Amino acid sequence: DQLYTLDDMASDVLHLLSAYRIRHAHIIGMSMGGAIAQLVAIKEPEKVSSLALLMSTSVRGIWDKSMPPPSQRVLDSIEKEYIYYMNGEICEGLKLRYNTLAFPEKISDREINERIRRMMRHGFNPFSRHVHAFQTSPSRTRDFSNILCGTTIIHGTHDELFRKEHAYNLYENLLNSSLHFVESGHFISENTGSKVANIIIDNISEVPKGLE
């Protein structure tokens, strides 16, 4: 059977926009979601009013040899996380993920539990092969000339999964882009989230009338 790809996920987004008759949209994507957002803007640029890429990359994530690898601390944590999943301890695995990737920020137990509650209500399958989709999808950098909208790139200064070089690479290859760093890891707390939201809102406010 053919596995689900990032291109399939981007097509899902575009089908959703068409189903709701949305002509223009502001697309925000974080981590792998940022890769999907790039593909949406590449495939149908006229539908994307603005793009915001958070802690993302234009290459094959942690498997791309052109970028610095994740820290050993993060790699060890990913291995432990999946051991939790294999033992059926989904919540413990997610708690480890949030605490590891948010470092050096400290996310409260209340916030972590609320994130897990929302994720479980939405549906979470740790073995859905979405990581395989990221690993096997080609770099998107060569197709960036298709992207017409303004792009806001936001990255954590302490991101140990996608190092800062990923953000610089996006900025250097995306025309009409701006680069912002926030004091965070790969995940952000509610407090940092409000700062990130303001940066995105500023970018949206610059979109010409009629395209917002």
Image (spheres, grey):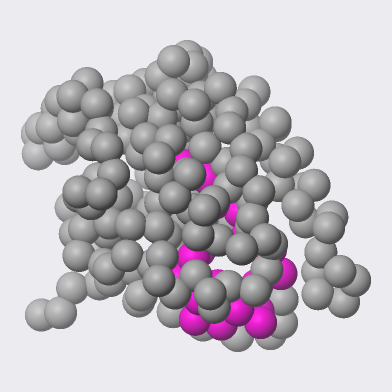
Residue 176 vertical position relative to residue 64 in the rendered view, above or below: below
Please state, as top left, top right, bottom left or bottom right, where the C terminus lies in the image: bottom right
Q: Residue at x 41, y 30 (%)?
A: 159
The image position of residue 207, as x and y in percent, is 81, 64
Q: Residue at x 40, y 57 (%)?
A: 58
Q: Residue at x 77, y 48 (%)?
A: 201
Total numbered badges shown on the rendered structure: 0
Judge left or right: residue 128 versus residue 18: left
Judge left or right: residue 189 versus residue 103: right
Can residue 8 be seen by looking at this rendering? yes
Residue 16 vertical position relative to residue 108 in the rendered view, above or below: below
The image position of residue 86, as x and y in percent, is 9, 39
Quarter location, residue 72: top left
Residue 5 vertical position relative to residue 29 in the rendered view, above or below: below
Quarter location, residue 5: bottom left
Residue extending farthest front: 172
Q: Residue at x 36, y 39 (%)?
A: 162
> Of residues 9 and 70, which is closer to you in this image?
70
Q: Is residue 52 magenta?
A: yes
Magenta stretch bounds: 37-55
> Of residues 56 and 19, which is closer to you in this image?
56
The image position of residue 13, as x and y in percent, is 50, 73
> Of residues 32 and 66, which is closer to you in this image?
66
Residue extending farthest right: 209
